[in-house]
């Protein structure tokens, strides 16, 4: 009897051990399976202003989609995103989601672009917003947002100087206001209220995307009707070249480096925005609504007291600002099918889900490129300003997305630096820029 119980106990022990071992094996298989099903999406993006907020949006998405892991790498601001993207692909570490500009970028990257025509957001696109990313009726990228830029200014400084911004509607009135403000700064009349204020402008010539793309677009955006026309143009005439010169000279001559303009070539985005406008060291900077978050990060009170003046090219449409799509999201067609599916789902979630839309408007401070954001109007003053210009029809198109690859930043931007340093005359700048356009096209 006793021996039988011992045998039974032994059998039970062995059985339980086998069951436990089997359970562990099953658990291990389950964990391996779950890990195997985990999809990883690598994103390589350029918008430094939303880097932190995009990471937060990713965490929100991953919480709803636990089988997806999204890695974000941001390269932009003072760095050349286009060059960095090429290097990324050449390294063999191809991103699954990356950014492309307009027609020229679409052409350059066509062999890597997934056709996104069947995505839910396509039918929600605002009229004309997909033109720069459409080829032969197929849509290859999702627009980031709608942005506008011009002369972002501190309303408080203008009020203290007795300048009415509503009267600045053309180049002449802008120049008069700048001269009046400069006199107030030089006389010390604003010193008590704005002790750090030293100049009207800060012009970051180191940032060739500011000069070679954005400043130039104020003129070329009136020579070409859209980025497609610029893309198809064999030549550039600089019809409004004199007006462009005046706009550049105005910013340089009334900057903190007016007596040594070559020093402007060392001024970067941070010096202009966070160490310039945000601390009220300067009153105006050439930037767009995307700069709100950077200024807010330094001084929210200053950020909420900003607005945008026109960016007038004399002899052209002078009471307007350039408005357009800054960049697009693209999906790498050579990524694995399950990765592409997750990449598309994330982008769709970001622009169509309630959570995603909240990030787009209230965290990224984007003006949406799609319908369906009716109850999410821009809350920041610069977003409101761009919307105001758009509603009033006071806009010119962004055509720099149609410039020959590298021409805006590497040719024109560098030529502007040479002009500021006294190495080029304006005529030499125009001559070189024209010749290089034809050669690169």
Image: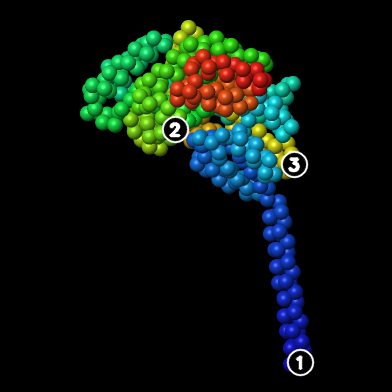
Residue tagged 2: 266
Q: Quadrant of residue 34?
A: bottom right
Residue at 75% x, 77% y is 15
Residue 143 visible from this viewpoint: no
Front of the two marks 1 and 2: 2
Q: Quadrant of residue 266?
A: top left
Mark closest to the chain's N terminus, 2 or 3? 2
Q: Element type at marker 1?
A: helix
Q: Position of residue 49 (x, y in %)?
A: 49, 35
Residue 42 visible from this viewpoint: yes
Q: Position of residue 97 (x, y in %)?
A: 65, 38
Mark closest to the chain's N terminus, 1 or 2? 1
Q: CA distance from mark 1 to mark 2?
A: 93 Å
Residue at 75% x, 79% y is 14
Which residue is most to the front?
A: 423
Residue tagged 3: 337
Q: Element type at marker 2?
A: helix
Nearest the eye: 186 or 424? 424
Tell me if label 1 and label 2 are in contact, CB under 8 Å.
Answer: no
Task: Report crowding for label 3: few under 14, some 14 to 19, many 20 or more residues within 10 A (C-alpha).
Answer: few
Residue tagged 1: 3
Task: Report crowding for label 2: few under 14, some 14 to 19, many 20 or more residues within 10 A (C-alpha).
Answer: some
Locate the N terminus by quadrant: bottom right
Front of the two marks 1 and 3: 3
Q: CA distance from mark 2 to mark 3?
A: 45 Å
């Amino acid at each position: 009897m006793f021996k039988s119980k011992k045998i039974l106990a032994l059998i039970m022990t062995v059985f339980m051990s086998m069951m436990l071992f089997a359970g562990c094996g099953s658990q291990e298989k389950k964990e391996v399976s779950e890990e195997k099903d985990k999809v990883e999406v690598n994103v390589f993006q350029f918008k430094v202003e939303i880097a932190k907020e995009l990471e937060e949006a990713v965490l929100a998405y991953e919480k709803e989609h636990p089988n997806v892991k999204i890695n974000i790498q941001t390269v932009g601001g003072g760095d050349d995103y286009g060059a960095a993207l090429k290097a990324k692909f050449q390294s063999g570490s191809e991103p699954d989601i990356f950014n492309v500009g307009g027609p020229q970028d679409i052409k350059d990257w066509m062999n890597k672009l997934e056709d996104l025509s069947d995505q839910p957001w396509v039918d929600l696109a605002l009229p004309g917003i997909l033109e720069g990313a459409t080829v032969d009726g197929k849509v290859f990228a999702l627009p980031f947002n709608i942005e506008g830029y011009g002369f972002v200014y501190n309303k408080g400084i203008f009020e203290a100087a007795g300048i009415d911004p509503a009267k600045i509607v053309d180049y002449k009135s802008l120049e008069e206001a700048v001269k009046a403000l400069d006199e107030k700064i030089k006389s010390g009349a604003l010193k008590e209220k704005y002790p750090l204020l030293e100049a009207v402008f800060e012009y970051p010539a180191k940032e060739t995307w500011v000069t070679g793309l954005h400043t130039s677009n104020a003129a070329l955006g009136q020579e070409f009707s859209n980025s497609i026309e610029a893309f198809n143009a064999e030549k550039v005439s600089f019809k409004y070249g004199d007006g462009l010169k005046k706009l550049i000279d105005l910013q340089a001559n009334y900057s903190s480096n007016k007596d040594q303009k070559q020093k402007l070539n060392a001024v970067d985005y941070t010096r202009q925005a966070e160490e310039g406008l945000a601390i009220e060291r300067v009153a105006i900077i050439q930037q767009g609504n995307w700069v709100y978050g950077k200024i807010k990060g330094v001084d929210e009170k200053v950020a909420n007291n900003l607005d945008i003046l026109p960016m007038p090219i004399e002899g052209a449409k002078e009471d307007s600002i350039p408005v357009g799509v800054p960049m697009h999201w693209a999906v790498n067609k050579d990524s694995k099918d399950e990765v592409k599916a997750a990449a598309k789902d994330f982008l769709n979630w970001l622009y169509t889900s309630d959570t995603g839309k909240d990030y787009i408007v209230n965290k990224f401070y984007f003006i949406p490129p799609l319908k369906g954001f009716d109850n999410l109007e821009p809350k920041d003053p610069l977003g409101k300003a761009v919307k105001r210009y758009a509603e009033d029809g006071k806009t010119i198109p962004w055509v720099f997305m149609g410039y020959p690859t590298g021409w805006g930043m590497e040719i024109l931007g560098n030529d502007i630096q040479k002009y500021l340093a006294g190495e080029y005359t304006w005529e030499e700048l125009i001559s070189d820029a024209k010749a290089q356009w034809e050669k690169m096209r």
